[in-house]
Image: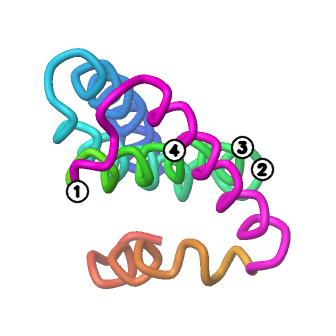
Amino acid sequence: MEILRFLAFISLAAGIVGVLLGSIINHKWYWLAIFTLYNLAFLTGFTIGLNVLAAVWILLVLAIGHSLGWITNRKRAFFASLLGLAIWLPCVLTVDDYWLFFPLRQLYRYAGLP
């Protein structure tokens, strides 16, 4: 499936751009990086994809923290990143992959992609 490979590379590029723009320009770009890296984690399968979810959880905590005004300096951003890792580890160890990627699985099924 060439389309899935294309989507994976586009997701990787957009995720990197989202992280860079989010850390340099505006934290709202983290939301783009979250969605695209989550998509990348789903498309790369369940080997590297579960490790990519660590970045997704870190970015999710950072995006929520910035949006609510809780992260005001680098120290708080560092502890938010640690919180993202602390959430990711039990999720990967205890939650089945089916439930971790359930939303995207339904979206791809609705779009007619395998």
On screen, residue 56 versus residue 28, left or right, reads right
- Disc 2 versus disc 1: distance between alpha carbons? 33 Å
Near-viewer residue (29 or 45):
29
From the top left corner, tell me how far across and down residue 47 is, in percent. Answer: 77, 50
From the top left corner, tell me how far across and down residue 35 is, in percent. Answer: 33, 53
Q: Which mark is residue 47?
A: 2
User: Which marked residue is nearer to the observer: mark 2 or mark 4?
Assistant: 4
Do the residues bearing badges 2 and 4 touch, measured as CB atoms within 8 Å?
no
Residue under numbered circle 1: 68
From the top left corner, tell me how far across and down residue 74 is, in percent. Answer: 43, 23
Do the residues bearing badges 2 and 3 touch, measured as CB atoms within 8 Å?
yes
User: Which marked residue is nearer to the observer: mark 2 or mark 1?
Assistant: 1
Residue 18 shows in the view: yes
**Comes first in the chain, label 3 or label 1:** 3
**Comes first in the chain, label 2 or label 4:** 2
Residue under numbered circle 4: 80
